[in-house]
Image: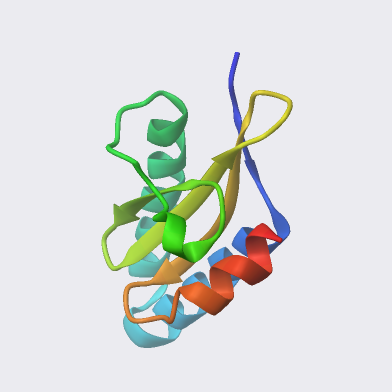
C-alpha cells in the first residue's frame, strides 16, 4: 500500500505555515489549515486530487497540486511511496527553491 512521507523541507514548511496562520488568524484557523493540508496529502496518495508534473524548465522530477494558497510538491520515492517534498506559498519564487529541496 502506498503511503505518503513528509520530507524535511516540507516538515519545516508545515511548522512555518502553522505559526504564521496562528499569529494572523488564531488557533482554530491554523489547526483547520494544517488539517486541510494533511487531507490533501492523503488525496495525493489515493489519486483524489489533480496533480500535474513539474515543468521540465525547473529541472526537477516531481509533481504538484494546489491547496488553498499553497502548492504541494511531491515525488514518487524508490520505495513506491509518495514523498511530500515541500509546500510553497503561491507568491514564492519556485525555481531556486525547488532545485534546493529536490536536490
**What residue is at 30 percent from the left and 54 percent from the top?**
66
Q: Residue furthest top?
A: 1
Q: Is residue 70 above or below residue 96?
A: above
**What residue is at 40 percent from the left and 40 percent from the top?**
39
Q: Left of 78 or right of it: where is 97?
A: left
Nearer the observer, 102 or 66: 102
Q: Is residue 72 above or below residue 69?
A: above
Q: Quadrant of residue 2?
A: top right
Nearer the observer, 34 or 45: 45
**What residue is at 42 percent from the left and 35 percent from the top?**
44
Q: Residue furthest bottom?
A: 24
Horizontal and vertical percent for residue 85?
A: 60, 54
Horizontal and vertical percent for residue 68?
A: 26, 61
Q: Quadrant of residue 96?
A: bottom right
Which quadrant does the C terminus fall into?
Answer: bottom right
Q: Quadrant of residue 88?
A: bottom left
Q: Left of 69 or right of it: where is 31?
A: right
Q: Is residue 60 above or below residue 97?
A: above
Amino acid at each position: 500500500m502506498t503511503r505518503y512521507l513528509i520530507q524535511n523541507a516540507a516538515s519545516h514548511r508545515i511548522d512555518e505555515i502553522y505559526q504564521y496562520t496562528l499569529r494572523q488568524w488564531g488557533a482554530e484557523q491554523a489547526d483547520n489549515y494544517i488539517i486541510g493540508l494533511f487531507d490533501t496529502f492523503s488525496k495525493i496518495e489515493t489519486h483524489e486530487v489533480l496533480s500535474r508534473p513539474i515543468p521540465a524548465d525547473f529541472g526537477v522530477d516531481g509533481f504538484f497540486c494546489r491547496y488553498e494558497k499553497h502548492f504541494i510538491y511531491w515525488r514518487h520515492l524508490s520505495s513506491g511511496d509518495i514523498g511530500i517534498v515541500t509546500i510553497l506559498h503561491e507568491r514564492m519564487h519556485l525555481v531556486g527553491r525547488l532545485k534546493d529541496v529536490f536536490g
